[in-house]
Amino acid sequence: MPTTPESPVILQVLPSLVTGGVERGTIEIAQAVAEADGVSLVASAGGPLVSTLERVGGTHFTLPLDTKNPVAIWRNAARLTALIQAEKIALVHARSRAPAWSAWLACQRTGARFVTTYHGTYAENLPFKRRYNSVMARGEIVIAASRFIADTIREQHGVPEARIRVIPRGVDPAIFDPAAVVPDRLVRLARTWRLPDGAPTVTLPGRLTAWKGQSVLLAAIARLTRKDVCCVLVGSDQGRHAYSARLMQEATALGIADRVRLVGHCEDMPAAMMLSDVVVHASTRPEAFGRVVIEAQAMARPVVAADLGGPVETVVQGVTGWRVTPNDPAALAAALDAALAMNLDERRALGSRARASVPTVRGMQEATLDVYEAVLTAARGEAEIDA
């Protein structure tokens, strides 16, 4: 960020700081702002990650930004206006639609600069939904996690290419490092998951929800040449216990229930990746990026990903992994058979190529700070002209 007499004050807004990719990205950027001698603020409804934010140098303001109620959005605009004025905030970075509307209104009132990150493919199945989504395309610069999302922004909202920056999410190669995972971590996790000794393990990390493709993977496991493969579904069902029960019913019907593990949320994802012979992304609709894919690649694991959305840009077919037709158990099974049939040298070569290809958190942080600098520099230029 630019050197100024006063450190620039940057505010990020999002619904809450509970868990997820948006929240992790917010904390990573908050840390980068603080390390660059800026003042790093975040406003949300709060959550368990507030303490993490504070540890990396950010300051949290608790506001009820986790609501889509139009009256509440209007009231939050007034709250953010007051916060911008009190803290002399130079730039607001919005990461979710309802808080973005409040932030956009507050920026219009105060003259603070407005940047957005367009995090996903927002549904447009209801009247006026495209207009509601359009606030994420109103940033002076709109950050997209992938070229797929950049194309969506341009096609759906008419945003010119000059206002879009593609900044992929990144991994921390020091955390997602195969050499950093000591055997005790693997043993502990294998026991917790009740993994059978010597059996290959195929893992799908992601929330337990239908579009993540857990059912597709179960059907693929039943088609594999090897009949000893253990299938691990990592992720919380977030209270959707009926879906978890349905998955086990499907596994029973396929005759693979004894080889399926629903293990819930995992705190040690590097170890989870290391325990996996293959990591699967099986989403049936496009994802903006697909962070678990690059986390697995950073851990030098073979990856099989659905050929849509962000993973198209991070998995090079046959070089750093495999891409398969979405929602196609037979295609997924064929790719898994190929991955499991690799010898040790082939696995090592693929893993090395995959690890070398992944974008990093540091790269994402630096690119985002460059966006802030560009917007703030433009603002200073406008101020000089007006003067």
Image (cartoon, rainbow, N blue to C red):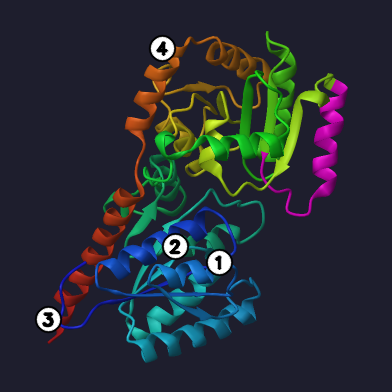
Q: Position of residue 246 (x, y in %)?
A: 84, 37
In the picture of the structure, the residue carrying the numbered disc 4 is: 345
Residue in the image at 37% along x and 55% along y: 143
Q: Is residue 2 left or right of residue 248?
A: left
For the residues labelled 1 and 2, say whether their Cβ atoms are less than 8 Å apart: yes
* 34 w.r.t. 341: above or below: below
Q: Is residue 166 left or right of residue 16?
A: left
Residue range (magenta): 234-253
Q: Which mark is residue 26?
A: 2
Q: Which mark is residue 17?
A: 1
Give, as a three-letter code, the residue at label 4.
Asp
Please report whichever mark, 1 or 4, sits nearer to the chain's N-terminal start.
Answer: 1
Residue in the image at 49% along x and 66% along y: 52
Give, as a three-letter code, the residue at label 2.
Thr
Q: Which mark is residue 4?
A: none
Picture quadrant of residue 353: top left
Q: Is residue 137 visible?
A: no
Nearer the observer, 328 or 352: 352
